[in-house]
Image: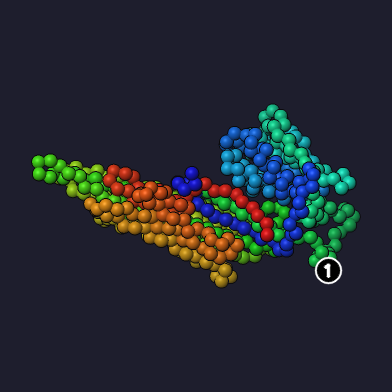
């Protein structure tokens, strides 16, 4: 269920210039590269149970660029299946560098099994592209890390469309002879090097992550970062018992709702590899209800937890957006406080150097609604801030939760307050996902 508890969206996008002609229709059994990758992912997904930990290690190809592209696309397709545990590409690349392991050369099964064990993977994925005349054949295999058994083997011929040609012609595997020094290309030659347009998007759930750009990225590259804070938790309800004539009666209080998380966007250009640290905040927890007996007087339910901030750091810069405040946050001074949580802000944006100012957009989250004592009704959580800038038409804007009708908070939305002896709902969130697309 995407709407409760866990993490909040942060997307890093890398945009490279120039365009690609759409692939032609397939003929006979020849597939486009995209179709082949998608079918391989579906075959792998159908083979393994939920939670199986898989590492995509190696793809042998005449072009490093082609191999890196297939690994990234296959990773994106496997992650989109939502039931496998795919090991992060940055972690794999770091381990490759530590062990001097090549991602695009010929590597023995034993070597891949060894690095798979160090990553804690249960199965490992490798592949190859073989070219015989005009035939381009892809093979993708999945090996069991412990037994070495081939668990999946997908094979097909692919069409040589403009995308495949660009990837193969942009080979980075050719190196100058030891006796020769590589000469920089002339301006007109450099202009003829095939380029392709691509968007890489990463989405991270709650926690601390590191991220670097895939090896096939060419510079300069344009970076877009979208960050969303977590929603604040809703306040718990209250039930208080009073004497009424010869009997008793109960009064019910509706707790206040949490505020929505803030959102921010920034874009800039980099000329070399960059490393990002992403700390994604968790949604605020809902407050517990309070029950009061005869002679005790009513008291508001326990306050909701604060939504966590999301912070992205790179090269001495930091972009931070705060989560919404939990509902009833003044309880330390007033145990009858029913004020809604305030929306998050993007105060951390000031940590960025001045060069980013004109490409920055930040918006606060909406406040949650107040609660009510001894009255019917509900309090709805504040909605998350929305950004309408850059490559994503609409980012954020998740709705706050509601108790009646029951509706959990969406991404970044504040949790609803509860009535009576019910706990307030948590701030909005949801598991992260990976997606990729091309222009």
Position in image of residue 285 (x %, y %): 39, 47
Horizontally, residue 326 falls left or right of residue 147, namely left
Could you tell me which residue is drawn at 78 percent across and 56 percent down? Answer: 162
The local crowd at label 1, few if under 14, some if 14 to 19, many if 20 or more residues have their Cα within 10 Å, is: few
Q: Nearer the viewer, residue 388 or 268?
A: 388
Q: How many marks?
A: 1
Horizontally, residue 123 falls left or right of residue 106, namely left
Position in image of residue 412 (x %, y %): 46, 54
Residue occupying the far top of the picture: 147
- Which of the image's four quarters has the C terminus? bottom right
Position in image of residue 105 (x %, y %): 79, 44
Could you tell me which residue is drawn at 54 percent across and 57 percent down? Answer: 312
Is residue 22 visible in this depiction of the protein? Answer: yes
Horizontally, residue 310 falls left or right of residue 24, namely left
Quadrant for residue 390, please give it.
bottom right
Label 1 sits on a secondary structure element that is: helix
Q: Nearer the viewer, residue 129 or 137?
A: 137
Q: Which residue is mark 1?
A: 188
Q: Is residue 421 above or below residue 354?
A: above
Position in image of residue 184 (x %, y %): 83, 64
Could you tell me which residue is drawn at 77 percent across and 53 percent down? Answer: 24
Is residue 323 visible in this depiction of the protein? Answer: no
Quadrant for residue 338, please give it.
bottom left
Q: Nearer the viewer, residue 87 or 316?
A: 87
């Amino acid at each position: 269920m995407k709407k409760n508890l866990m993490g909040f969206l942060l997307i890093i996008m890398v945009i490279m210039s120039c365009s690609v002609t759409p692939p032609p229709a397939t003929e006979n059994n020849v597939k486009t590269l995209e179709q082949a990758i998608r079918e391989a992912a579906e075959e792998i997904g159908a083979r393994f149970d939920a939670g199986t930990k898989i590492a995509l290690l190696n793809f042998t190809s005449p072009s490093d660029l082609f191999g890196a592209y297939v690994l990234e696309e296959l990773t994106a397709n496997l992650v989109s299946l939502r039931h496998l545990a795919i090991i992060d590409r940055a972690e794999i690349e770091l381990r490759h560098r530590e062990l001097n392991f090549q991602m695009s050369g010929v590597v023995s099964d034993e070597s891949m099994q060894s690095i798979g064990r160090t990553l804690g993977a249960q199965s490992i994925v490798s592949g190859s592209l073989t070219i015989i005349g005009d035939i381009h054949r892809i093979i993708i295999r999945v090996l069991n890390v412990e037994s070495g058994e081939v668990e999946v083997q997908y094979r097909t011929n692919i069409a040589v469309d403009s995308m495949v040609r660009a990837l193969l012609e942009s080979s980075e595997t050719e190196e100058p002879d030891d006796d020769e020094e590589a000469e920089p290309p002339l301006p007109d030659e450099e202009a003829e090097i095939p380029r392709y347009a691509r968007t890489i998007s990463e989405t991270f759930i709650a926690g601390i992550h590191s991220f670097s750009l895939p090896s096939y990225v060419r510079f300069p590259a344009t970076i877009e970062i979208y960050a969303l804070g977590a929603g604040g938790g809703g306040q718990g309800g209250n039930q208080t018992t009073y004497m009424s004539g010869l009997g008793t009666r109960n009064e019910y209080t509706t707790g206040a709702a949490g505020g929505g998380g803030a959102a921010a966007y920034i874009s800039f250009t980099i000329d070399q590899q960059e490393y990002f640290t992403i700390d994604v905040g968790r949604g605020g927890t809902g407050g517990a209800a309070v029950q009061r007996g005869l002679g005790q007087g009513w008291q508001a339910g326990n306050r909701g937890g604060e939504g966590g901030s999301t912070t992205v750091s790179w090269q001495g810069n930091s972009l931070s957006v705060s989560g919404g405040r939990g509902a009833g946050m003044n309880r330390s001074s007033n145990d009858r406080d029913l004020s809604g949580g305030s929306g998050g802000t993007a105060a951390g944006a000031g940590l960025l150097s001045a060069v980013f100012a004109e490409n920055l957009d930040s918006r606060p989250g909406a406040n949650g609604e107040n609660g009510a004592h001894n009255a019917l009704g509900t309090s709805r959580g504040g909605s998350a801030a929305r950004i309408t800038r850059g490559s994503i038409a609409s980012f954020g804007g998740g709705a706050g939760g509601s108790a009646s009708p029951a509706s959990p908070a969406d991404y970044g939305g504040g949790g609803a307050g509860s009535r009576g002896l019910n706990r307030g709902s948590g701030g909005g969130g949801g598991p992260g996902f990976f997606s990729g697309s091309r222009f």
